[in-house]
Amino acid sequence: MQTIELQLLLHCARSKLDTRLIRALVNEGIDWDRLLELARQSRVRPLLMRSLKSACWDAVPLTAQLKLKSFYRASVVRNLFFTGELLRLLDIFRKNNIAIAAFKGPVVAEVVYGDLFLREFVDLDILVHEADLCKAEHILTACGYHPYLSGSDYRSAFFSYYCQQPFLSQSGVIVDLHWRLASKSVALPMQSAAVWGRLRNVTIVGRTVPTLALEDLALLLAAHGTMHGWESLVWLCDFAELVRQHQGIDWRAIFDRAQQARSSRPLLLAIFLAFTLLDAPAPAELVDKARSNRAVRALAEKTELAMLRPPSEGLGEFLQGLNTHDLLRDRIWPVATLLVTRTVNDYQAMPLPKSLWGAYHLIRPFRLLGRIAQMLRALLK
């Protein structure tokens, strides 16, 4: 059952507002500390502030107003700084003749919301061809970034499963360098190599930035949200606003692509949640398909609870990622891959010299069994 704070947040986290309903909910009595914490956890404070200003700013306690204003000012500065850094890196990659595409972060803010300051983001995501990885790493290093683990050998050994590697600058900017759009456990109905031919340009503060086609973005947002169990409301807002702002998208064609790849469940789940929780004008045909799909309905029922919990990581995220596969048999390969693939967590749990890295393949199954046992004990308490 939704709390009144979650109800209010859901009605504020959208571009099309029912101001009378928002004011009515506020007048019922809101725990403002709880609401602001929920908005912080869900990363939708800019949307909350804008909606409250439109509907009933006079009814918001002064302390809550000040907290939202203070956050928004800091968020504007951070978003501008991150966007400037993205544009700087794009210029440098172009000068070095390396193809690059940006997605999430500032790009989603512009494409989905049409406003750089309505979307919270904490990092930058860029995609390069796998053949350009070493060059891209050298460029980021020359630009003042350092990798989470140093060297291409570490990347090959411990990041191959994730298909991305984080880089951190001294100024606090995190760049996730991707050579595929999703980890190996996630079913994505598009090959990363194929998206390059469908790229589109978006204008951000007067500059042209290459990014994913809208259809590819829809599939990525659906898979990403499902992979994380839709724990953060902002991911659902992204998808719902994409539906709302780009109604010319051929959703039937997107669904056919997903179904052929045996990964239609994330798309149906995203459409169903966007329609039921955020009143997005989703295509009726796909809403009906989602409603008649028992697995989609079961996942949807868990979503509201997930939004009230702290985000999960590691094995929990992997298990959620299996929900991107329609068929049970397609989940066997990701599980088998996980059992034998070295990851960053293995290195952190037991740092070994490079000459012994091969031992991680033998140690990993036992580590996973231990973590599964811990999860089961926690569930039984």
Image (tube, grey):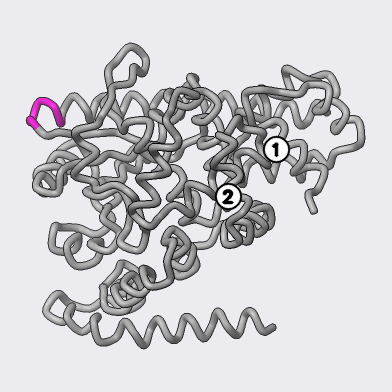
Residue 363's spot in the image, x, y percent? Answer: 29, 86
Residue 334's spot in the image, x, y percent? Answer: 33, 70
Query: From this viewpoint, is residue 357 visible?
Result: yes
Residue stretch in magenta: 93-97
Q: Which mark is residue 290?
A: 2
Give the mark nearer the N terminus: 2 vs 1: 1
Which residue occupies the extreme right position in the image?
A: 28
Which residue occupies the extreme top position in the image?
A: 206
Q: Could you say whether the residue bearing mark 1 is in a helix, strand or loop?
A: helix
Q: Could you say whether the residue bearing mark 2 is in a helix, strand or loop?
A: helix
Q: Which residue is mark 1?
A: 10
In the image, 252: left or right of 142?
right
Q: Amino acid at mark 1?
A: Leu
Q: Amino acid at mark 2?
A: Ala
Of 7 and 159, nearer the camera is 7
Q: Quadrant of the N terminus?
A: bottom right
Image: 10 above or below 293 = above
Q: Which mark is residue 229?
A: none
Residue at horizontal 68 percent and vertical 45 percent from the top? 38
